[in-house]
Image: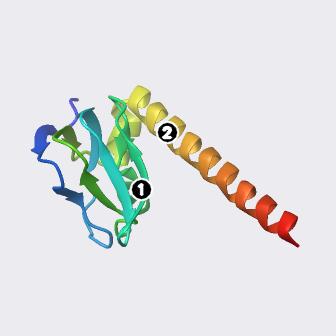
Amino acid sequence: MALQQKKRLYKKNDVITTEGDLSFEWYVLVKGKVGVYKGDILMNEFSERGVIFGELSGLLARPRTATMKALEDTEVMVVESSIDEVIRNHPDIANKILISLAERLAKTTDEMWAVIGELEQKK
């Protein structure tokens, strides 16, 4: 069974997702650059082809945790398949999602410990 997906193009500064939205589609970056915002603060950006993003809302069935904006003209594949369908019918993609989430968690953990270390040194 094929994934339900469609190509979508965004111009520079277009909003891809908005923090707080209740949409459950997720995305695969084809080309371009995407910024991750909490409020007006740019928290992260990525431009690697094949990066999966926006999947947390689908996995957790909760509102979007960040706003995503195109930082340059950007092309994505929008995937509308549920995570259950992906796990059942596309385990290779499910594996990629898990690895992506684990890598982001490891990066966030490293950054958190770096901040804690700096605070401890200032004491």
Residue 81 visible in rendering: yes
Find the residue positioned furthest to the front: 122
- 66 over 13 or under it: above or below: below
Q: Which residue is mark 2?
A: 100
- 95 over 121 or under it: above or below: above
Q: Quadrant of residue 30?
A: top left
Please identify the quadrant where the C terminus is shown.
bottom right
Question: Whole-Å distance between the Cαs marked 2 and 1?
Answer: 11 Å
| Residue at 30% over, 46% down | 34
* Label disc, if present, on residue 56 of the rendered structure: 1
Residue 4 visible in rendering: no
Pick whichever, 11 or 118, lies toward us.
118
- 76 over 109 or under it: above or below: above
Q: Residues within 10 Å of mark 1 (few under 14, many from 20)?
A: some
In terms of secondary structure, where does tag 1 sit?
Answer: helix
Q: Is residue 8 left or right of residue 56?
A: left
| Residue at 78% over, 61% down | 118
Q: Is residue 107 left or right of residue 66?
A: right
Instruction: List x then y, in percent, for residue 22.
Output: 27, 69
The amino acid pointed to by label 1 is Leu
Pick whichever, 2 or 97, lies toward us.
97
Instruction: List x then y, in percent, for residue 117.
Output: 80, 59
Pick whichever, 58 or 84, lies toward us.
58
| Residue at 32% over, 28% down | 49
Q: Is residue 41 left or right of residue 74?
A: right
Instruction: List x then y, in percent, for residue 80.
Output: 21, 47
- 100 over 112 or under it: above or below: above
